Amino acid sequence: MNICAEGGAAGMNNLHFTATCDMLDLDPAIKLKALAAFQQSTSDGGLTEKRDVQEWLCCAVYCELQRVKIKDMLDAKLITDYPTNAAEKAGTSCWNLSLTKLLAAFKVNINQFMERMKQWNVLVKNEKVFQQEIDDLHRRLCMTLIIRKHYQRVFDRLFVLPEEDTENVEARSIHTSLYEFGWLLFLTIRNELPGFATSNLVSGCQVLICTLELLYVNALEMGNAWVINRRFPGVPRKWGSDDFDDGLLLRYSALEEICSLIPDLPRKGVRVMKNAFFHKALVVLFSDQNLLGNDTFMREIIKEGLLDVNLATLNRNYTNHVADISEIDERFLSCSKKTPPVRYKPRVPYRYKQLQKLPKAMPSVITEALDPEDADVLSNVENLVLDMARTFGVSSRDHLSTDAAGECFALACRLYYQFLQRIIGSELLLKPHLKMVQLLKQRTLSVTLVACCLELALRIREDRVEELKFPFILKCYSLDAYEFQKILELVVRHRTGLIGRDLIKHLQAVEDECLGSLMFRGDSSFWKILGKAQRVPSCKEVQAREKENALGSGPEEKPRTGFVICLCKFYCLANQRLVNLCQSLVLMEHFPKIWLIAEHSFIQQGGDLLKQRNLDHLLICAIHLHARLKRLRLNFSQILQHYRWQPHARREVYRAVPLGDGQSGDIIDFYNKVYVKSMEDFAQGLRSAKEGLPLPALQETLPKKNVVSLNITVCTQVKPKNLQYCSGTWIKVNKSKADPEDESTLVELDQLIITPLKRGHSSNDLGLLASPNVLKRQCIQ
């Protein structure tokens, strides 16, 4: 019987429930069992009101996921001979879903959920273990809420939020990042400690004090006087003056002063916690490269460039940790930091308030440098800006009022004229033979720069509109993604004093979207620039051309320098994403061969596999093809589970893949119908060295049961030894039973992992990412 085939209100509830389950990528069996349990409990018709349906359905799904988890954990205890397989199976199970994500999808408050679960457990007569899970969750959450209040109060004593009208636009952003980083570091270290060390409120506060002391001393080392509270007794004498010796901070400790900020907390216990547990957990984070900095003195973790890198790494690892139906994401508690009340909500944040004072006209430096006969050039530029303003007003009228659109474009104009002045000045210094009027006549430069500044203005506004997010700008002005990505680096290069780190990170995300998918659309100028050969250069060819252009040799290459730079950034992005995915799957030993497959798929048949598709399509398929060649029992389901943990992952990437001729399918359809046919000859070549070994079946079939081989590990307790991959180090690929034909080799990883062109740090510097410890918390005695 089709239990979804009902009409009226019940039918609408089922439709909403199905849509929510699809958004969560829930197993169909889980969805059907949860819906059946809900309908059975409501068969008398008097259980719930209409507004409570989503809460009860959420409880039903939660119980089914917990039931699967309990079964998997019992199976794991029985499989004593193959603990790795059990952990790997758990690592890709359907219950690897954060409880926070489940509640957000059903739009249920955590307090409502826990109250409903008590009633649901009684109603459906669940085992005691289900209520025990809820009680444990409630206890942990209450304890964390108290600790968070202490964190906020102590943090406000150590650091100060710079004034709104300060000239240092970076200071407020740094203050926010420090607040987020400190709380995340506390959560991460607490999860690394044994349970008995954090089982009560006192030990939790001790870990908090140790974390804040580490954060504070590192902030002193950073030397940003805007965010340090100088009235706090823990500030060293003469700190911030020219006479202060920074070397003293290497062994400096403010533990006693910070400990006094939480009354009645024994200082001796804090020192014991720091020496016995906290320091060891910190060493583990450094050794696993989850924290970058000076691991000898535990310093430099928030210095310029590393704060964002470490914050991104901890966020990624914590996301993996809470990918468990029994875990709740406690990062959201850091978002509840209270701010002083204001009389009105400004449309532009105070840190960018000075941008509104910039002139909204062509800089006098440019107008005075032009000859009188070039006056029409300025007129053309101004008319172009007016036309773009009208176009934006029409395109955004459904989402912004006329006044709001005008204010937004006015801010974009002010930014445009400032960046135009800086870019023209820089270009004239680099190329003295150029004339200013030649640059002003370049319509593409003006249009893309105005569009980029408008994207920044939309991002700056606090009342952001979902429909106006990138790539709205490209659609608004019919811009080519390949041309648009060129201007982004120029803007970042000339950003000083205009935009902060948050906008720089946004532009980097925009650039990644252009390089990863948008510039491969069929009408993109990227394909036209490839030339008659219709061949995408390989990574080595691109790097060689870039070196030649940088040295000035080969003048015939200079006109294509922009194209070469674009390809360099594309290969950098592909390399970075593949490294992150291989780290998550613990396949770094196989990375060189997977990269070889991925690179060939980029250049295959003039880049046909890239056209109209996403970079991630080919990376996912490359991993699966390698698994087929090596006969690893790694299926798409498991690869996609780890892909979803990537910060750039989107559901439509693997749900709707162009197959050609206007058709689309999921990632498995693309692999079977398109990818394998294009890559089969190359795969045959990879196997040609293995005499007598036939080419394995490359096509994917829908798996009946997920089974993982022993040489693929998704557990934090099992990590490959002798595996380092920082810049300048090597990987030792050991001979294994699964690959008898491979000899132990030393591969110089710098040849395979590409250093980004303009990013100070990439995910390559983040080290081996640990997978979530799915069996850490036992719910069965």
Image (spheres, helix red, strand yellow):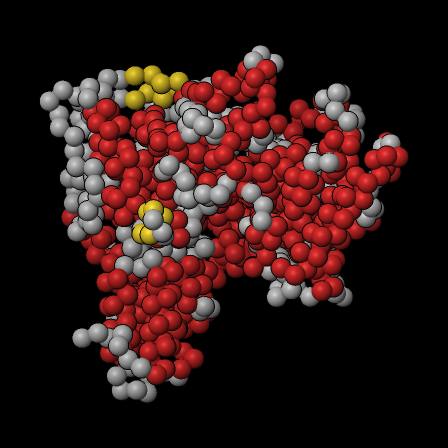
Whole-percent x and y of residue 106? Answer: 41, 67
Q: Residue at x 17, y 51 (%)?
A: 704
Count the marks. Answer: 0
The answer to which of 489 and 644 lies nearer the viewer is 489
- Quarter location, residue 420: top right
Residue 266 appears in the picture as rendered: no
Q: Residue at x 24, y 78 (%)?
A: 40
- Position of 136 relative to 669 (above/below): below
Whole-percent x and y of residue 725? Answer: 42, 25
- Position of 102 relative to 300 (above/below): below
Quarter of the image with the N terminus in it: bottom left
The answer to which of 197 and 541 lies nearer the viewer is 541
- Position of 579 relative to 722 (above/below): below
Whole-percent x and y of residue 63? Answer: 29, 66
Q: Residue at x 58, y 12 (%)?
A: 553
Residue 423 appears in the picture as rendered: yes
Whole-percent x and y of residue 665? Answer: 31, 52
Q: What residue occupies the far top of the structure in this picture?
A: 553
Q: What residue occupies the far left of the structure in this picture?
A: 692
Horizontal placement of 526 versus 236: left or right? Answer: left
- Quarter location, residue 769: top left
The answer to which of 294 and 493 lies nearer the viewer is 493
Quarter of the image with the C terminus in it: bottom left
Q: Residue at x 56, y 59 (%)?
A: 466
